[in-house]
Image (cartoon, grey):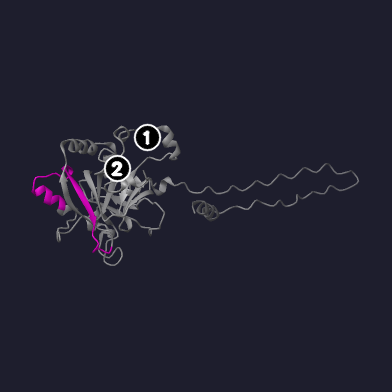
Amino acid sequence: MSELTLFSKGGNTLPAHLRNLQLDATTKSLMGGSSGGKRISIKGGVFRMLVDGKEIAQNEDRAMNIVVVAANENVSRTYYADTYEEGKNLAPTCWSNDGISPDAKAEEPQASKCASCPQNIAGSGQGQSRACRYSQRLAVTLENDMQGDVYQLQLPGQSIFGNAENGKMPLQAYAKFLGGHGIPITAVVTEMRFDTASATPKLTFKAVRPLELEELENAQEKGQSPEAKAAIASTSSAVDGAKPKAAIAAPTPVQEAPAPKAKAKPAAEPKEEAVAEVAEPTKRAKKATPTDVAEVLDDWLD
């Protein structure tokens, strides 16, 4: 079984006796203390499985079938002051879980309310976009492994808002469509498909089939799991294991080496006038500046 089998549409699933096993100490030790946060990214128009920020599998199909087991009831917001750099997992500068006020854990809140925030003004981002981005967090399972892992799926604004066009529905329109027919989104298998007409990654949704009774009970149980609750409450960077800036220790300046003490000169002979001996200048250890240390750390990180 290849590493992609479990992540590909229609692939085989794990045997029943392996599906609900908890990770043992051996596996955790080999993972380097990883917390096991799992999510699905749509970066580059490809479905990607990430574990603690590391990509471990891809599904290059245009569509993937999932079951939505939980969702953040609010549209979230996220703002990054720094320019995105490939390979760097940075915590956002400011974010809001409810879309109303900055989260209490945000180190650099940009305003007391999101509505009056300067990062929420058209043009604060690239072009006429807003620097603070909308997103919707879902907790999902894969149709071909419903009893397996719960993944976070964080959708960008263009996958959330808008009207249905030619049967293509963004998330809110899809949920309203199901709700209008009295069907919960958690009671169906949902197909998420990339909109190939969009210049940037955008998903549309449609119902594939209703869940069987046993599948529905499993989805409801998964929706109450700690993994699902963490998925809808945490930013994608937090799921990936990013630390806030305050948690990143500043490099410790190299301490200056103390100069050795001069040795005392023995008493002078009576016939000669005592002459005070001047200790030879001692070469002081070069003091490394914080910049020097930062450069060393950068080399390690590279």
Q: Position of residue 86 (x, y in %)?
A: 40, 57
* Quadrant position of residue 158: bottom left
Q: Position of residue 85 (x, y in %)?
A: 40, 58
Q: Residue at x 36, y 41 (%)?
A: 36
Q: Looking at the image, which is closer to me, 245 or 194?
A: 194
| Label 1 sits on residue | 23
Q: CA distance from mark 2 to mark 1?
A: 21 Å
Q: Position of residue 87 (x, y in %)?
A: 41, 54
Q: Earlier in the sequence, mark 2 or mark 1?
A: 2
Quadrant for the N terminus, please.
top left
Name the amino acid, label 1: Leu
Name the amino acid, label 2: Asn
Q: Residue at x 11, y 47 (%)?
A: 179
Q: Residue at x 91, y 46 (%)?
A: 271
| Label 2 sits on residue | 12
Q: Is residue 211 magenta-colored? A: no
In this orientation, does residue 128 appear?
A: yes
Q: Which residues are magenta?
A: 174-199
